[in-house]
Amino acid sequence: MSEGTLDEAYERLHRTGPEFEGWLSNHGPMAVEALVRHGHQQRVHRWLDDYLGRLDELPRGLHPIDDWRDALGDPKRAGDWLAYFDRQLREHQWRDVLATWWPRLLPGIAAGATHGVIRVGHAVRALEADEENPRRLTELGQALGYWAARWQPIPGTDRLFTGDPDEPGTDDIDVAGALAGLPRIEDQTGGVRDRLGRLPAVPRWEPALAALRPARSPAEAQRGLTTLVHRAGLDYLRFGHTNPVMLVHAVTAPTAVLRTLPALDRALWAPSFAAAWAATAAMTSVYAPANGIAPPTVTPATPSEVFARAARHGDEHVVKLADAILDAYATSADERLLTAPGYAGQLI
């Protein structure tokens, strides 16, 4: 990675807020990390020159975070949360801060249409890639602060975090079967918050969510997450035409969780898998049609060319999807996945 380019980009971006135009997520830090990761650092500053004009200023705080439980999920406290995590990461090791806050934030994985956890995943990968520095610590703090300010649970997930991982079940975690069994909300209109709010009225939602049994070990959680990203990538080819932007998050959210696992205590891996499953399931149920289409025909390409095409396209969602898909391809060698970013580029 060209570390200097990424840190320069972070410095430019950290003058901006985590959202703009109401509550659209600032994708800048995630997109530039992916561009640099895949060797396209020469595009970063030109891309930022265009993107920065959309963004809002860094939000001001109201008053310091005292009782974090009261402030969790309050977007009006975004500035306070950013200041809180900036202070935490100045006073403590970043892995210790992550260890404390990951289990607190994980039940609210829907935050910012899952962009809270996605931004954290990119920030952790940047810190793991090279020696930590103030800009990367600031990025992790802003990512955690955004997640905390927009913290939002997915309806019906309480049991996922309280169930017994040793309860009887099938020998294998059937991710493909669980995804195939997901119901859909009837009214697929409005924003993500409106759509998630309709899930409790879907009788089959909670049974379908619980159909994927908990992971019984850290290794099983990691395998389950790897499979989830793989299957969600293939599902994008079948369902992406209906909402090509939002269904990207069914792939990128579990990818972010998977990337964060190495920085977490292994005791957190099983609940992390449960939360990632809930995120992908929810995005599928509220945005995907009941019946998919045949996967599109896209010109085959090597992994490096897949990302190069995404970088040339320039849309932040296409870039982030390509980044996630290449992770999935590296573990599965399933060449079908390589068509997903090109398809997204046609749709977006």
Image (cartoon, grey):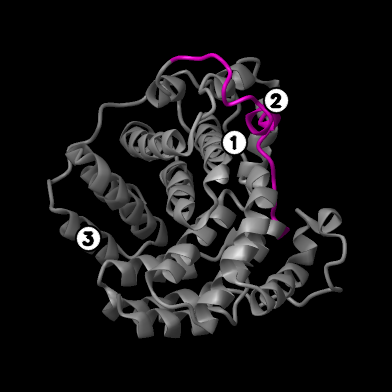
Please say if 131 is above or below 339. below
Q: What element carries label 1?
A: loop
Q: Residue at 69% across / 70% down in the picture? A: 85
In the rendered image, the quadrant that contains the N terminus is bottom left
Residue 220 position in % (x across, y down):
43, 33
Residue, disc 1 = 189
Please say if 130 is above or below 30. below
| Identity, as a three-letter code, of the amino acid under mark 2 | Pro
Q: Quick check: can you spot residue 311?
A: yes
Residue 311 position in % (x across, y down):
28, 65
Q: Which of 262 and 62 is in front in this view?
A: 262
Label 3 and label 1: CA atoms lie apart by: 31 Å
In which quarter of the view is residue 282 placed?
top right
Residue, disc 2 = 200
Residue 48 position in % (x across, y down):
42, 78
Q: Magenta segment range? A: 149-170
The numbered mark at residue 170 is none
Q: What element carries label 3?
A: helix
